[in-house]
Amino acid sequence: METAEHLHVLDTEGRRLAVAAEQAGVDAKVPTCPGWQIRDLLRHTGMVHRWAAAHVAEEHREPQPDGGLPDLDGEELLDWFRRGHTYLVDTLTQAPPTVSCWSFLPAPSPLAFWARRQAHETTVHRVDAQSALTTAQDPIAEDVAVDGIEELLLGMHARKKSQVRSDEPKVLRVRATDADATWTVRITQDPPATERGGAGEADCELAGPAARLYLSLWNRLPFPSLTGDAAVAALWRERSAITWG
């Protein structure tokens, strides 16, 4: 996906998140984030949006602390979230392609990194917000889901901070059944090493539609189809919480 496509996703998903949050109400529980209410989701995502925007707008070359969670609630909190989301979209849209600032995953440019990261951050949290409703959730496009799986496996969990590790080497295969996309994840005492393709044997395979895999790898849904050693999938589930930055 190109940066402009990521920005469109970020804009659309942030608006959907706000609508779902307003419909559910700030007191509603978020089933996909046990222990959270909608107010927690708005505070967290709004904080991340402002944190991301600041790195680009102010061209910080080193990671900056976030601004903390706001002491707001109700309509004030919703308005605060919407303003922060708009500021992030506008900042990334208006930034020159050559903008230089800190980022934490390989990407063609810092702008490409932040647009992609915030597109997926916001997509997953939109799903969280809609999980508080009884209505059907908006679908995730196949190309967005595949791109999100790529970012998660080849980016987020390639970092030293990933806790998905095993004393005994294991191989996890992830196969999107509605897309020409397969990944092989080698889990060892080091951060997971992921390669595209499905060559070789795997201890466990997770297969299903790309959107379902995307959300299950982010621990938002059960794994769609699992074959082989279920303990490998359980290891992912238990150890894959993301540490930011």
Image (tube, rainbow, N blue to C red):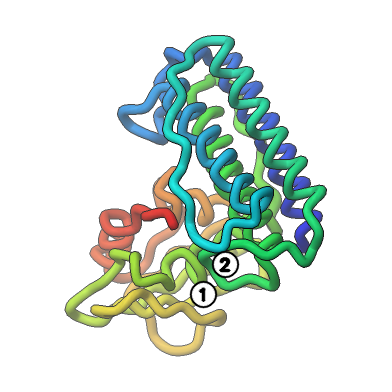
**Secondary structure state at the residue bearing disc 1:** strand
The quadrant of the rendering that contains the C terminus is bottom left
Could you tell me the amino acid type at mark 2? Glu
Q: Is residue 151 left or right of residue 56?
A: left
Task: Return the residue found at the far left.
Answer: 167
Could you tell me the amino acid type at mark 1? Trp
Mark 2, residue position = 150
Q: Which mark is residue 183?
A: 1
Foreground of the two, 169 or 55: 55
The quadrant of the rendering that contains the N terminus is bottom right
Foreground of the two, 214 or 40: 40
- Mark 1 and mark 2: span between their CA atoms? 8 Å
Residue 210 shows in the view: no
Q: Residues within 10 Å of mark 2 (few under 14, many from 20)?
A: some
User: Is the residue 78 above or below the residue 160 in the image?
Assistant: above
Q: Position of residue 157 (x, y in %)?
A: 42, 67
User: Is the residue 22 above or below the residue 41 in the image?
Assistant: above
**Secondary structure state at the residue bearing disc 2:** helix
Q: Position of residue 16 (x, y in %)?
A: 67, 30
Q: Residue at x 57, y 12 (%)?
A: 76
Foreground of the two, 152 or 39: 39
Callout in the foreground (1, 2): 2
Q: Residue at x 43, y 72 (%)?
A: 158
Cβ atoms under marks 1 and 2 closer than 8 Å? yes
Q: Position of residue 89 (x, y in %)?
A: 73, 41
Q: Residue at x 70, y 59 (%)?
A: 143
User: Is the residue 172 above or below the residue 86 in the image?
Assistant: below
